[in-house]
Image (cartoon, rainbow, N blue to C red):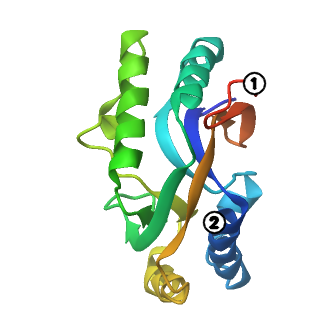
């Protein structure tokens, strides 16, 4: 049974490979393999919800993707963790105006179509992040942080695509290249 849906922002190949290095380093040390096991792809989650009509989102996301003139520049610059029981570790992008504006446009379009954005993804509360490990054992958090510090941040690249996935396991429903209306 589905746990929910997420709108995800995907990276160019070089930036994606930098994130995969982190996933693989943590997997080799047997700290966390969950993202690999569920079939995830490096991304920034723009919106997530337990229930949604994918067809309703397809039109919204296709429009947002087509209105974006170019790939969004991204710089993953910090390592972080949320103060909850999920023990999620992430790389956080520098919150550029372009990224924040893109997220705001998506949220406004969702609200106009009657989709509840939810507290965690509201424009003024959203913390952009790229997960690198989930459910890290509490006694291994410091070790995981040390491994991530070896990544030599910052790493830069571009967001190139936006898609909708159902999880878990992750199954892509659709994606669109930013600036290209012909995808689907």
Numbered label attached to residue 182: 1
Mark 2: few, some, or many residues within 10 Å (few <14, many ≥20)?
Answer: many
Q: Position of residue 177 (x, y in %)?
A: 68, 37
Report the residue at 76% width, 28% height from top. Answer: 183
* Quadrant assignment for the N terminus: top right
Q: Secondary structure at mark 2?
A: helix
- Quick one: 77 or 164, which is closer to the camera? 77
Label 1 to label 2: alpha-carbon separation = 24 Å
- Residue 154, above or below 59: below
Mark before the other along the chain sequence, 1 or 2: 2
| Residue 131 at least partly seen | yes
| Residue 88 at least partly seen | no
- Residue 149, above or below 45: below
Q: Position of residue 125 (x, y in %)?
A: 25, 43
Q: Position of residue 99 (x, y in %)?
A: 41, 47
Q: Which residue is mark 2?
A: 15
């Amino acid at each position: 049974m589905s746990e929910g849906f997420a709108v995800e922002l995907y990276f160019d190949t070089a930036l994606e490979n930098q994130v995969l290095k982190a996933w693989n380093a943590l997997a080799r040390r047997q700290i966390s393999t969950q993202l690999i096991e569920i079939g995830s792809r490096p991304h920034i989650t723009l919106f997530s919800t337990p229930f949604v009509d994918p067809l309703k989102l397809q039109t919204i996301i296709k429009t947002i993707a087509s209105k974006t003139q170019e790939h969004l520049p991204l710089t993953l610059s910090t390592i972080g963790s949320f103060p909850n029981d999920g023990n999620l570790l992430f790389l956080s992008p520098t919150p550029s105006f372009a990224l924040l504006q893109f997220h705001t446009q998506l949220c406004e379009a969702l609200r106009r179509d009657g989709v509840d954005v939810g507290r965690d993804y509201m424009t003024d509360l959203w913390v952009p992040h790229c997960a690198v490990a989930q459910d890290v054992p509490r006694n291994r958090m410091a070790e995981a942080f040390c491994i991530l510090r070896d990544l030599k941040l910052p790493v830069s690249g571009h967001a190139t695509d936006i898609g909708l996935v159902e999880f878990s396991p992750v199954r892509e429903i659709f994606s669109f290249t930013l600036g290209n209306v012909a995808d689907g």
